[in-house]
Amino acid sequence: MQVFKELQRKAALQSQTPELPHRLPEEPLLRGIFEIGKRSRDVVLSARRLRWSPIVPESPAGGTGRAVKEEIIEMKDVFSVKVKRRRFVGQKKGGTLLGITIFKCLHKEENKLTDCAIHLNNFSEDHCHSWFRCLKEILNGFQNRPKSLKVFVNPSSHKREATHIYYEQVSPLFKLADIKTDVTVTEYEGHALSVLKECELQAFDGVVCVGGDGFVSEVAHGLLLKAQIDAGKGTDFISAPVRAPVPLGVIPAGTTNILAYTLYGIKHAVTATLHIVMGHIQPVDACTFSTPSRLLRFGFSAMFGFGARTLALAEKHRWMPSNQRKDFAFIKTLADLKTEKCNKDQWHKIQGDFLNVSIMAIPCLCSMAPRGLAPNTRLNNGSMALIVVRNTSRTEFIKHLKRYASVKNQFSFPFVETYTVQEVKVQPRNKSGLDAKENTDTNATAEEDNYPWNIDGDLIEASEVHVRVHPQLINLYGVNTDDLESSKATCNCI
Ligand SMILES: Nc1ncnc2c1ncn2[C@@H]1O[C@H](COP(=O)(O)OP(=O)(O)OP(=O)(O)O)[C@@H](O)[C@H]1O
């Protein structure tokens, strides 16, 4: 079973083949001798592969006498090539030619990617330059790989390490891959959104954000909002949004990193960077979250009830360190567990007292839920998972929450219902027993109407919210969740 999954993943990645005009992928383009790993090798380059074998002297009786082991690098795994020279400290140009170096992406355990260098040594300028040019031409043929990126870094994320992560781990790989960057280190909440609204996106092949889920959500919203503005659409009510013009890459540096976990199967900045550099693109469903009168935002997931109350309480205690704050809010909300009275209007109406309502367009993998908060949905199946937790005892609710961390089905409880939906309206009933719509008609105060919503980790105050999924509205750098190895991560927080 494991082998089958690996083959499936490889097949998915292999669909990337460079476009070289008038060439067959296996046709040898160059053949020559290089020293690799201190031995002379016979090296052959085609658009698909670089392969080499040791040069073994013929025995006096003829023949080599032993089998020759060939080594192969798939060009789809190569992301950079450089001419290698020996230089003195401080010397910027010239230097003694040593050969060429190829930088390749290596698949490690548990979805991790790292980079590694392979040195092909040869002292001939002509030889090395013709190989360098040919390798470069092959790399330029990978259409999905970005050459220019707009980068947003949130310096206030988690332990304030996003800037360090970007400049120490991400930026050097972008430089190595000859990707130009335009970096904005944000100065306040909403900064990325206002820069995106004014940004000429056609100058870039992609947008990258370095931070946690709240920041990804701001940038994804900004990117999609800008697409609507550029398409001449109004931004108050959007029924048929246009797609984001460029893909979005997510470098995890936040307290929660559900998006990165879902796209890469791991919270690892280098893995995320290499998926961007290699141009692994994944179309993803996105949602619009609207009140009856206006668009609240674009996003991927929302929680109403327990998940939103927890976030609202955490936000009130911003002075606490982020992990402590989240644990505190989780335990306190659990201790004060209470339901929300809801209607879900039209089509199929569900009414009652709910502890939590989750609406998710993507599986939302994270360390607390290695199979996902919504394992029954896919990144781009054009539908959302609606998970409704009806009123129950605290003990039963905790049992349900604990199941997220295990391999057992977290939904097999009589008080949990799951639906596959394209559209949901959540209408909370207020204290006087009216639903949000009736309440507006009787001119009750707006505050009384409002309830906390957790939209992609961002706290939003609203009453009736209309959620609609829009299939494959945005491309994200990453892979399909089905192609990821299942994670061994578990959580012991409850
Ligand atoms: N320079 C900034 N100063 C303050 N807030 C910012 C700044 N830049 C972005 N933000 C906002 O910070 C919020 C949280 O960011 P992010 O998700 O990166 O961090 P986090 O540590 O995971 O968040 P949290 O502490 O809320 O869990 C986002 O809503 C984002 O819009």
Image (cartoon, rainbow, N blue to C red):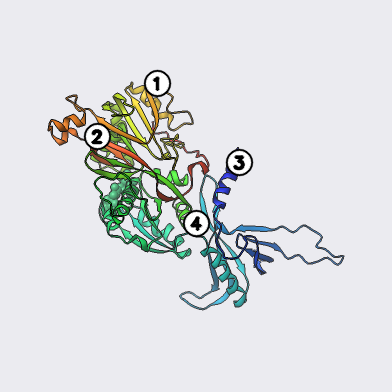
Earlier-in-chain disc, 2 versus 1: 1
Read off the residue under disc 3: 4
Left or right placement of residue 395 versus residue 290 in this view: right
Q: Secondary structure at mark 4?
A: loop
Q: Secondary structure at mark 3?
A: helix
Within-10-Å neighbours for mark 2: few <14, some 14–19, many 20+: many
Read off the residue under disc 4: 278
Please, is residue 370 above or below residue 284 in the view? above
Q: Amino acid at mark 1?
A: Pro
* Nearest to viewer (mark 2 / mark 1): 2
Earlier-in-chain disc, 2 versus 4: 4
As measured in the structure, the alpha-carbon distance from the residue carrying label 3 to the one carrying label 2 is: 46 Å
As measured in the structure, the alpha-carbon distance from the residue carrying label 2 to the one carrying label 4 is: 42 Å
**Is residue 417 something one can see in this rendering?**
yes
Could you say which is closer to the camera, residue 436 or residue 448?
436
Earlier-in-chain disc, 1 versus 4: 4
As measured in the structure, the alpha-carbon distance from the residue carrying label 1 to the one carrying label 4 is: 45 Å
Label 3 near ligand 1 (CB < 8 Å) = no
Earlier-in-chain disc, 3 versus 4: 3
Left or right placement of residue 78 versus residue 236 in this view: right
* Figure quadrant of the N terminus: top right
Residue 179, image x, y percentages: 44, 64
Could you say which is closer to the camera, residue 190 or residue 124?
190
Read off the residue under disc 2: 464
Residues tagged 2 and 1 counted as in contact (Cβ below 8 A) = no
Residue 282, image x, y percentages: 46, 49
Residues tagged 1 and 4 counted as in contact (Cβ below 8 A) = no
Q: Secondary structure at mark 1?
A: loop
* Figure quadrant of the C terminus: top left
Earlier-in-chain disc, 1 versus 3: 3
Read off the residue under disc 1: 414
Left or right placement of residue 312 versus residue 136 in this view: left
